[in-house]
Amino acid sequence: MTFWIASSPHNHIKAATPSLMRLVILAAIPGVFAQWYFFGWGTIIQIALAILFAVLAEITFLAARDKNIKSQITDFSAVLTGLLIGISVPSLAPWWITAIGSIFAICVVKQLYGGLGFNLFNPAMAAYVLLLISFPLEMTSWQPVSSLLVEDISLFNHFWLILTGYTWEGFSVEQIRMSVDGITMATPLDTLKTDLTLGLTVNESFANPVFGEFIGLGWEWVNIGFLLGGILLIAKKAIDWVIPVSFLGALLVFSFIAYTISPDSSASTMFHWLSGGTMLGAFFILTDPVSAATTKKGRVLYAVLAALLVYLIRKFGGYPDAIAFAVLLCNMAVPLIDQYCRPRTYGHKGVN
């Protein structure tokens, strides 16, 4: 059985689910490559583990429901969910973090709601929020980029660190996460938020080596990679350009206003665009055809609301990044958004 994904009611651009999922997976390769290049083999291992657990969870749940396993496994939706979870998990997080996230995404968020097409929330982002709230230390402790590590970590030691928490030589994950200055590194978003609470200005915070010479050492290239993949998806008409363009445009407006009012305590638009999971969220998460708004006006409102939530949570919230929280909150608002943004029925005039 082949499913077709298309936004109702008048969108004639639709694609078979397996083809669409494979295209999205292909489009994510530039961002995944950049993440591997700057953060090591742990990224690839986490993606492989997440896909493995997601597929196994899908098979187990489908078997328990006496469903056709082959047709639903070969639609690649579980693979894509695993890919997004693997990308979002820190590269040196323990393996069971990835396992819990993947199993929760498939069994609870997807299958308990009836499977693909019936889930109210984006499975990968729901799993990420679960992990972030339940295991904040593991989920916010990213390793420094490879150039700032005391010594290189081999593929084998990445694997051993994820499985046991130690390298083969006995170094712990925390020792590996120490920079050349003996300071535990955090993401640019987390570093800036912490520095601002300590009374530093944005420019003073940017002296930290985690920011490099531009926006955020390594992270800007990861976001550019996902941006390139997103452009491919738009060119292939796999996603509607309205959501990512509205999201990035609104984030530009909100960040520019704040930066204009207080440049010492507000980061620039480029920092917000090229830090954290901004481009991944704009092109690969918010555009989910199942959990996103379906009408044209609704998609604009949905994307603008997501951008506002991202900026507010990054600026005032307790977590450094905000894509997952914003996506879930917007997913909850989708029925209301679509209710009030429905297009007028063709051939009928409005009632005065």
Image: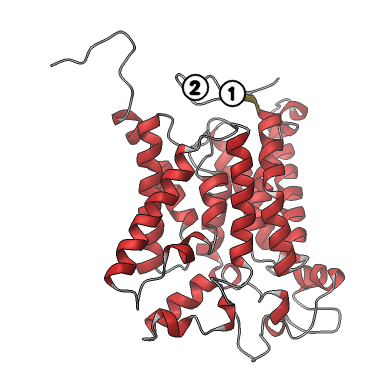
For the point 27% across and 70% down, the residue is 261
Marking on residue 11: 2
Residue 184 position, x and y percent, is 61, 84
Question: Can residue 26 be seen by looking at this rendering?
Answer: yes
Q: How is the image coloured?
A: secondary structure
Q: Would residue 100 be seen by someone viewing this image from the given angle?
A: no
What amino acid is labelled 2 in the image? Asn
Depth check: 164 or 141 in front?
Answer: 141
Seen at 70% across and 56% down, the residue is 32
Quadrant of the image containing the N terminus:
top right
Q: Image quadrant of residue 141?
A: bottom right
Q: Point out which mark residue 14 bears.
A: 1
- Near mark 1 (Cα within 10 A), the count class, few <14, some 14-19 or many ≥20, is some
* Residue 317 locus on image (x, y percent): 38, 67
Contact, CB < 8 Å: mark 2 with mark 1? yes
Q: In this view of the protein, which residue sits in the foreground, 231 or 349?
A: 231
Residue 214, x across and y down, in percent = 55, 72
Label number found at residue 29: none
What's the amino acid at mark 1?
Lys
Q: Residue furthest bottom?
A: 181
